[in-house]
């Protein structure tokens, strides 16, 4: 099975190891992975800030980079996947790119969704000895409708005890520029998320989105707490 990688800005610039680990898992299950080095941002930051013309320009490049074949497109981000699926249609309404948008919606998958729904994989053969809780990122849960797939994968990780926190579906407070424009509110939301995780006795918070995890981890470090964060691709590539 041929797979094109879509590597979001956060992964590319700040957490490249997660991208490599995603490739590691996909190749384990016989995927032929390709990476277009010309790819850039999907345009979500510009769109969310109201710069639709700029977002449309970036989106045109994204469509050009990813609609040239019938391969699956897989990304380690529910946020970026959800944006392309749900807002490109509005961005390119009544445009020459309309058919490309319709095509890409059927080919683009978030990583855990692809593993479970397309490859029918729940056991990646990973081992990680820790007690962990899962954070439902807004993009993954609300934009992509992904809830059970990450948990199915985590439940099969040997040595990992998965415990649910009460605020698992509550926003962590990042929200892109929201964290900059409304810092006190954003920090308060991070406090709620981390407090809920601590109450489970977990040592680690796992999620599908590094933007959420970066925000959560910054709060954890600021408070000097003994908890770590991990992207699910890094978890699934552990212990081989």
Image (cartoon, rainbow, N blue to C red):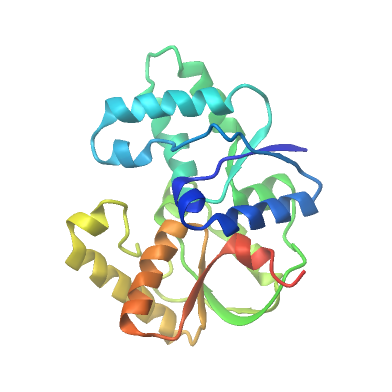
Identify the image quadrant of residue 118: top right
Q: Residue at x 55, y 78 (%)?
A: 132
* x, y percent for residue 4: 65, 37
Front position in the image: 70 or 150: 70
Q: Residue at x 74, y 55 (%)?
A: 121
Q: Is residue 62 above or below residue 155?
A: above
Q: Is residue 35 above or below residue 238?
A: above
* x, y percent for residue 31: 77, 44
Tell which residue pokes out farthest to the right in this image: 30
Front position in the image: 213 or 149: 213
Count the marks.
0
Front position in the image: 149 or 223: 223
Residue 139 visible? The answer is yes
Q: Is residue 191 above or below residue 142?
A: below
Classify residue 223 as left or right of residue 118: left
The N terminus is located in which quarter?
Answer: top right
* x, y percent for residue 34: 69, 37
């Amino acid at each position: 099975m041929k797979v094109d990688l879509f590597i979001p800005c956060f992964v590319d610039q700040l957490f490249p190891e997660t991208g490599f680990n995603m490739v590691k898992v996909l190749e384990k299950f016989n995927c032929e992975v390709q990476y277009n080095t010309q790819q850039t941002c999907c345009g979500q930051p510009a769109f969310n800030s109201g710069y639709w013309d700029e977002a449309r320009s970036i989106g045109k490049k994204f469509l050009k980079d990813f609609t040239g074949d019938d391969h699956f497109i897989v990304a380690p981000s529910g946020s970026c996947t959800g944006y392309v699926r749900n807002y490109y249609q509005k961005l390119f309404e009544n445009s020459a790119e309309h058919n490309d948008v319709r095509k890409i919606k059927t080919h683009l998958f978030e990583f855990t969704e692809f593993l479970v729904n397309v490859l029918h994989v729940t056991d990646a053969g990973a081992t990680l000895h820790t007690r962990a809780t899962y954070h439902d990122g807004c993009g993954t849960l609300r934009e992509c409708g992904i809830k059970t797939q990450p948990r199915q994968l985590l439940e099969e990780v040997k040595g990992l005890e998965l415990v649910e926190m009460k605020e698992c579906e509550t926003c962590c407070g990042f929200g892109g520029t929201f964290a900059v424009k409304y810092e006190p509110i954003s920090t308060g939301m991070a406090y709620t998320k981390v407090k809920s995780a601590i109450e489970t006795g977990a040592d680690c918070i796992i999620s599908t989105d590094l933007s959420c995890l970066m925000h959560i981890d910054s709060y954890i470090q600021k408070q000097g707490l003994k908890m770590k964060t991990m992207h699910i691709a890094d978890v699934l590539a552990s212990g081989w």
